[in-house]
Image (cartoon, rainbow, N blue to C red):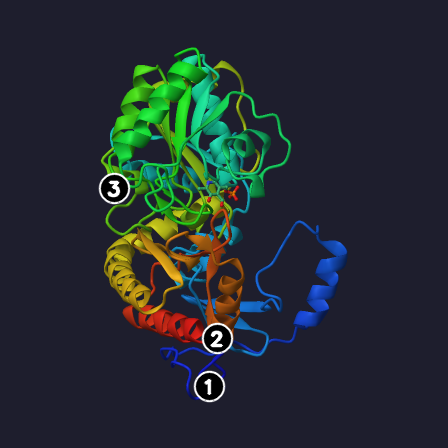
């Protein structure tokens, strides 16, 4: 086989078998692409690994390089590939829709758009049933922030330190990590203390962190706010699951101050956390506005904002329009993704495999001092590396060494967190128990080599 590790070094853990061979690749080499990238793509577009992989083909939880070598995609794109690379049902839906009608705007009727909207609404609680389609998570969050401001007549928005909400000016303002910020006007956004059980000021005491939001409303605003916006598990921030009890207490304070609660489900939605379809459900709250993107299209660019009919009314004051939002090819893809998640029980799989994987990672923590923390839920897991468990000094260099070694052995994994020292494990939800074993065995081997 041409698997990245299996026949290369005998002592490496063996990648689970997969009955599929990628078609031969005849395109440009990695070196040729890299040269063009350096010349023609913005230098802001960074890549993983000193020698980045030339990804030419994808099938379910695997990617293939130019030599037909197979890699386990433990990052799932960037938590974007929910049901598996090129899942046949999603591909079929995209091809059928592309051959039928590639583009229609919301100015006309088209059932691909309404069918997906109806299906999305059916997955949300309460009367969260009015859908606005966008092309990305950033756009979805920009719209959510604007809606909250219009609805409440207030400007102040509370978000969390360490949050990532997007890269346009409003969402960059709501994002709270200097790594991801330029000098944008950050009008009216207040960042609360992050309810981070590992590094946060109050450990895992969700209610103490929630008190900070109450203070922030009293001392940093007029006492009235437009919204609170947060992820349930911070993705880019390093898979930080908000301390338990935090969201119910904060939602209550925000509503007392006249604000709306926005759940950014761009990474944590669509079954990824296993125990529930949406991340916010893990804290038993019901938001007023839910935003989503990434996994909802299995990698096809589609995002959405879902809210109540009453809140949605505010956008009828003017024409509100998005040229590509609700493109029928994207909505057909999204609808197919939902059907696959349900038919293949992918949420349940995320729960079963994710729980097993977390257990194995915790056992690995007992073996390797460099693992400071294992956290997350379902198939949204984080492994934080530190050079010293007491001081929690981020192992910024070591994580790169482990990551490189894992690549050599056939596993691609994500990395993030403020210090860049957290492995982000967000594979396609079809990830199997054998894949989980392989991932942990490879990580174990790579850490032992440090
Ligand atoms: N919100 C969250 C939680 C995200 O993780 C991201 C992207 O990483 C975004 C919003 C922005 O989404 P996009 O990159 O599609 O604009």
- In the image, what residue occupies the spot 51% across and 53% down? 420
Residue occupying image coordinates x 33% and y 62%: 430
Left or right relative to 248: residue 322 = right
Query: Percent from the top left, x then y, of residue 288?
Result: 33, 26
Mark found first going from the N terminus, 3 or 2: 2
Residue 234 placement, left or right of 322? left
Residue at numbered disc 2: 70
Q: Nearer the viewer, mark 3 or mark 2?
A: 3
Whether residue 286 is visible to the viewer of this picture, yes or no, is no
Q: Do labels 2 and 1 touch, CB within 8 Å?
A: yes
Position of 218 relative to 131 (above/below): above
Q: Which residue is label 3 attached to?
A: 282
Q: Is residue 206 left or right of residue 311?
A: left
Looking at the image, is mark 3 or mark 1 earlier in the sequence? Answer: 1
Q: Secondary structure beneath disc 3?
A: helix
**Where's residue 155, x and y in %?**
48, 17
Horizontal side of residue 51 vs 113, given as left or right: right
State which quadrant residue 13 falls in.
bottom left
């Amino acid at each position: 086989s041409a698997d990245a590790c299996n026949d290369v070094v005998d002592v490496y853990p063996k990648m689970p078998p997969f009955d599929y061979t990628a078609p031969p690749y005849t395109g440009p080499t990695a070196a040729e692409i890299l040269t063009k990238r350096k010349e023609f793509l913005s230098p802001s577009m960074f890549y993983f690994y000193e020698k980045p992989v030339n990804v030419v083909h994808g099938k379910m939880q695997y990617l293939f390089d130019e030599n037909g070598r197979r890699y386990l995609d433990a990052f799932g794109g960037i938590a974007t590939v929910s049901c598996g690379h090129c899942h046949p049902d999603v591909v079929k839906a995209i091809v059928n829709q592309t051959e039928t009608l590639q583009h229609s705007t919301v100015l006309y009727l088209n059932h691909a758009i309404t069918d997906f909207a109806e299906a999305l609404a059916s997955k949300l609680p309460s009367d969260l049933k009015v859908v606005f389609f966008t092309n990305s998570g950033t756009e979805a969050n920009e719209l959510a922030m604007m809606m909250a401001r219009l609805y409440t007549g207030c400007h102040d928005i509370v978000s969390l330190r360490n949050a990532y909400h997007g890269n346009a000016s409003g969402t960059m303002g709501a994002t709270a990590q200097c790594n991801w910020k330029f000098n944008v006007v950050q009008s009216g956004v207040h960042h609360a203390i992050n309810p981070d059980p590992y590094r946060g000021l109050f450990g895992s005491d969700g209610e103490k962190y929630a008190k900070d939001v109450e203070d922030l409303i009293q001392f940093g605003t007029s006492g009235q706010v437009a919204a609170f916006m947060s992820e349930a598990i911070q993705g880019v921030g390093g898979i930080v699951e908000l301390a338990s009890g935090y969201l119910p207490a904060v939602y209550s304070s925000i509503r007392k101050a006249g604000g709306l609660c926005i759940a950014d489900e761009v990474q944590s939605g669509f079954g990824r956390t296993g125990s529930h379809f949406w991340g916010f459900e893990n804290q038993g709250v019901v938001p007023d506005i839910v935003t989503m993107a990434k996994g909802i299209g299995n990698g096809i660019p589609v995002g959405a904002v879902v809210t109540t009919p009453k809140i949605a009314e505010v956008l009828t004051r003017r024409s509100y329009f998005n040229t590509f939002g609700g493109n029928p090819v994207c909505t057909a893809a999204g609808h197919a993704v939902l059907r696959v998640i349900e038919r293949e029980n992918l949420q349940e799989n995320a729960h079963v495999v994710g729980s097993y994987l977390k257990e194995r990672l915790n056992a690995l923590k007992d073996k390797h001092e460099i693992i400071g923390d294992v956290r997350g839920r379902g198939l949204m897991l984080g492994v934080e590396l530190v050079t010293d468990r007491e001081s929690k000094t981020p192992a910024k260099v070591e994580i790169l060494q482990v990551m490189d070694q894992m690549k050599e052995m056939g596993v691609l994994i994500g990395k993030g967190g403020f210090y860049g020292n957290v492995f982000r494990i967000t594979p396609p939800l079809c990830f199997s128990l054998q894949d989980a074993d392989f991932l942990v065995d490879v990580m174990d081997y790579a850490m032992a080599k440090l």
